[in-house]
């Protein structure tokens, strides 16, 4: 899989604070942004940022391949995969529905099937496709920034204080948290806000990343 960027930036944090990050905050922010982005991606099972020409190996349901990452912006190629796991032939005649499905009903080999494959088609296919959002959806950005700021702000707050309002944003802190080295935490409210970006599992069988 291609490398993906963090889901928020230091500037996004500064915009929500209404001020520049302090030197201490700048030192901690990159790791916290990376941690929050990883937690969000693990929860949603989505890259969310744009990725071009991403290869994946999928097993069809009937004659349909369901692409797991959304939104799909392009499908570059579909190829058959042999029993030994190697790509054996590009296909033509497949169709993409413009969303997340590739229809193999009319797919044929660009050349001819290997002799051993006469009859039933292959069990798996290698698809190269592009996907993701540009820019990151505002709802995802908001959750990532909130996760980071809960941790980033707490060391500078008055002892015993567990919440702070900054402009239109209200940050609720973990009781007893906020010491330097505290980890980013995803709350139930964060998960609820991210639920709409979760995976559509029905009809999708992913074999492995290509």
Image: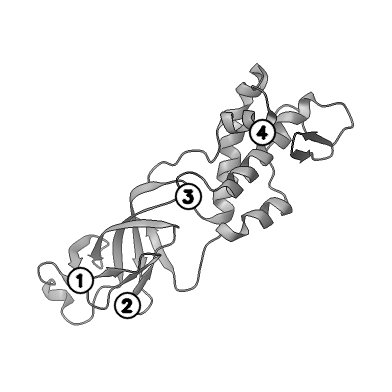
| Mark in front: 4 vs 3 | 4
The CA distance from mark 1 to mark 3 is 29 Å
Q: Which mark is residue 63?
A: 2
Q: Quadrant of residue 31?
A: top right
Question: SS for tag 4?
Answer: helix
Residue for badge 1: 93
Q: Which mark is residue 12?
A: none
| Mark in front: 4 vs 2 | 4
Compare marks 1 and 3 and give the one earlier in the sequence.
3
Compare marks 1 and 4 and give the one earlier in the sequence.
4
Residue at the image point whose x is 45% and y is 73% from the top: 203
Image spot of residue 17 (x, y percent): 69, 29
Compare marks 3 and 2 and give the one earlier in the sequence.
3
Few, some or many residues within 10 Å of mark 4 (<14, 14–19, 20+): some
Compare marks 4 and 2 and give the one earlier in the sequence.
4
Residue at the image point whose x is 76% and y is 39% from the top: 171
């Amino acid at each position: 899989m291609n490398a993906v960027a963090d889901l928020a930036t230091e500037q996004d944090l500064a915009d929500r604070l209404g001020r520049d990050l302090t030197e201490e905050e700048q030192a901690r922010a990159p790791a916290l942004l990376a941690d929050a982005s990883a937690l969000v991606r693990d929860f949603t099972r989505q890259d969310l940022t744009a990725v071009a020409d991403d290869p994946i190996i999928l097993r069809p349901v009937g004659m349909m391949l369901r692409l797991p990452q959304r939104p799909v912006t392009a499908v570059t190629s579909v190829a058959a995969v042999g029993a030994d796991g190697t790509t054996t032939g590009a296909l033509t005649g497949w169709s993409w529905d413009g969303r997340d499905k590739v229809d193999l009903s009319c797919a044929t080999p660009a050349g001819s099937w290997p002799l051993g494959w006469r009859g039933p088609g292959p069990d798996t296919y290698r698809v190269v496709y592009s996907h993701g959002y540009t820019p990151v959806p505002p709802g995802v950005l908001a959750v990532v920034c909130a996760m980071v700021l809960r941790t980033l702000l707490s060391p500078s707050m008055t002892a015993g204080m567990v919440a702070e309002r900054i402009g239109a944003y209200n940050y609720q802190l973990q009781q007893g948290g906020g010491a330097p080295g505290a980890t980013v935490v995803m709350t139930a409210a964060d998960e609820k806000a991210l639920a709409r970006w979760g995976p559509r599992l029905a009809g999708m069988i992913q074999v492995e990343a290509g």
